[in-house]
C-alpha cells in the first residue's frame, strides 16, 4: 500500500515539471533510447511518405498552382472559400457519407455473423474461411471490372439469371438510382472477408473458461453472446469500425472503374474521385489539395468522435 502511494506521489511530482525537463529525463533512460533506435527507420518512412506530404498538401491548399505551370501565387483561404460554393464538393461529400452509412454497418454485421459461424466447430470451416477471404486478395480494380461485366444488362451473367426466372433487368451502372447501391454491394462483398478474419481472431482469443462459467450459471446462447462475447470482443470491433470508416471515406477504385467519372449525374462521385478529377484531369493541384485537406480533417474528427464516444462507454 505504501509503495503504491509513493509511486503515485512521484508520478504527480513529475507531471508538475516542465515538458522539456520531462523529455530530457525520458531520453536519459537506456530503454527509451533503445526503443527510439528501433523506431527510427519507421519514423523516417512515416516522415518522408506521410507527414511531409500532409504538410505539403496543406501549403498547396493555400496557393494557386496548376501542374506544369511555373507561376505560384499565395491565395490564403481562397481555395476553401471556393469549396464552400462548389456544389460538386457537397454532392461528393453527401455520396461519401451515404456510402459510409450503408457499407460500414452492413459490412460489420455480415463480418460478425460469418466470424461467429466459422468460429464454431464445423466440418470444412477452413475451406469456407478461404472462400470468404478470397475476394480480399484480389485487386479492387480487377474486381470492379469483373462486376461491371456481371452487371451488364446485355452480356452479364446476372442479367442472364434474372431472365431465366422472369425478373426484368436494368442497366444498374447507368441508372442514377441504382449505380451507388451496386457499388456498395461490390464493396461489401469485397471487404467482408477482411473484417471477418480480424473478428474471428478476436473471437478465438476469448478464453473458453468464460463460456463454461456462463453455462454453469444457466446462460443461454444469446445471453453468452451479450455478456461474454461482445464485451470481450469490444477492442477488436472498435478497431474494425474505425478502419472501416476511414477506408469508406477513401473509396475510389470501385467507383472510378465501375462508374467512370462518378457515374450518371454524378450519383457515385465521392470525395476522392473528385480530388482525382480536379488534380489529375484538370491539373488544378492546389484546389485538389484543399479538398484533400478538408477530407483529412473530416476523417480525423470522425475518428476522434468515435474514440471519445467509445471511451465514455467504457467509463460507464
Image: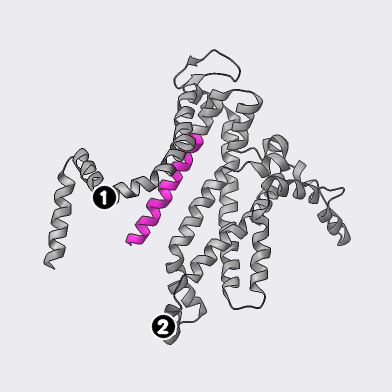
299 magenta-colored: yes
Say above or below: 249 vs 203: above
Q: Residue at x 60, y 27 (%)?
A: 279
Say above or below: 166 vs 187: below
Mark 2 or mark 1, earlier in chain: 1
Q: Position of residue 41 (x, y in %)?
A: 43, 42
Magenta: predominant secondary structure element? helix
Q: Is residue 24 visible?
A: yes
Considering every residue shown, the one lying at the far top of the view is 71
**What quarter of the picture does the N terminus occupy?**
bottom left
| Residue on which disc 1 sits | 30
Q: Is residue 109 visible?
A: no
In front: 166, or 262? 262
Mark 2–mark 1 distance (CA, rounded to whole Å): 45 Å
Give the residues drawn in magenta, as a range.
Answer: 294-316
Q: Secondary structure at mark 2?
A: helix
**What quarter of the picture does the C terminus occupy?**
bottom left
Amino acid at each position: 500500500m505504501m509503495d503504491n502511494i509513493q509511486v503515485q506521489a512521484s508520478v504527480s511530482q513529475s507531471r508538475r515539471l516542465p515538458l522539456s525537463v520531462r523529455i530530457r529525463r525520458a531520453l536519459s533512460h537506456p530503454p527509451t533510447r533503445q526503443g527510439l533506435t528501433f523506431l527510427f527507420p519507421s519514423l523516417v518512412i512515416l516522415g518522408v511518405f506521410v507527414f511531409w506530404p500532409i504538410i505539403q498538401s496543406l501549403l498547396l491548399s493555400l496557393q494557386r498552382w496548376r501542374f506544369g505551370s511555373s507561376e505560384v501565387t499565395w491565395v490564403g483561404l481562397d481555395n476553401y472559400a471556393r469549396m464552400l460554393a462548389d456544389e460538386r464538393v457537397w454532392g461528393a461529400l453527401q455520396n461519401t457519407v451515404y456510402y459510409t452509412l450503408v457499407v460500414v454497418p452492413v459490412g460489420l454485421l455480415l463480418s460478425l455473423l460469418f466470424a461467429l459461424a466459422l468460429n464454431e466447430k464445423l466440418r470444412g470451416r477452413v475451406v469456407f474461411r478461404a472462400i470468404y477471404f478470397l475476394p480480399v486478395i484480389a485487386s479492387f480494380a480487377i474486381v470492379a471490372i469483373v462486376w461491371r461485366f456481371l452487371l451488364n444488362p446485355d452480356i452479364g451473367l446476372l442479367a442472364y439469371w434474372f431472365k431465366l426466372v422472369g425478373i426484368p433487368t436494368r442497366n444498374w451502372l447507368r441508372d442514377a438510382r441504382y449505380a451507388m447501391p451496386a457499388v456498395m454491394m461490390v464493396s461489401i462483398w469485397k471487404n467482408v472477408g477482411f473484417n471477418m478474419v480480424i473478428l474471428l481472431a478476436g473471437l478465438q482469443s476469448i478464453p473458453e473458461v468464460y463460456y463454461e462459467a456462463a453455462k454453469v450459471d444457466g446462460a443461454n446462447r444469446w445471453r453468452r453472446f451479450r455478456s461474454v462475447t461482445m464485451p470481450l470482443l469490444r477492442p477488436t470491433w472498435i478497431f474494425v469500425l474505425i478502419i472501416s470508416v476511414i477506408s469508406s471515406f477513401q473509396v475510389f477504385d470501385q467507383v472510378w472503374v465501375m462508374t467512370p467519372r462518378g457515374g450518371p449525374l454524378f450519383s457515385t462521385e465521392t470525395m476522392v474521385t473528385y480530388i482525382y478529377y480536379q488534380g489529375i484531369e484538370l491539373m488544378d493541384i492546389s484546389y485538389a489539395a484543399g479538398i484533400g485537406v478538408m477530407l483529412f480533417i473530416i476523417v480525423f474528427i470522425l475518428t476522434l468522435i468515435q474514440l471519445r464516444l467509445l471511451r465514455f462507454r467504457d467509463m460507464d
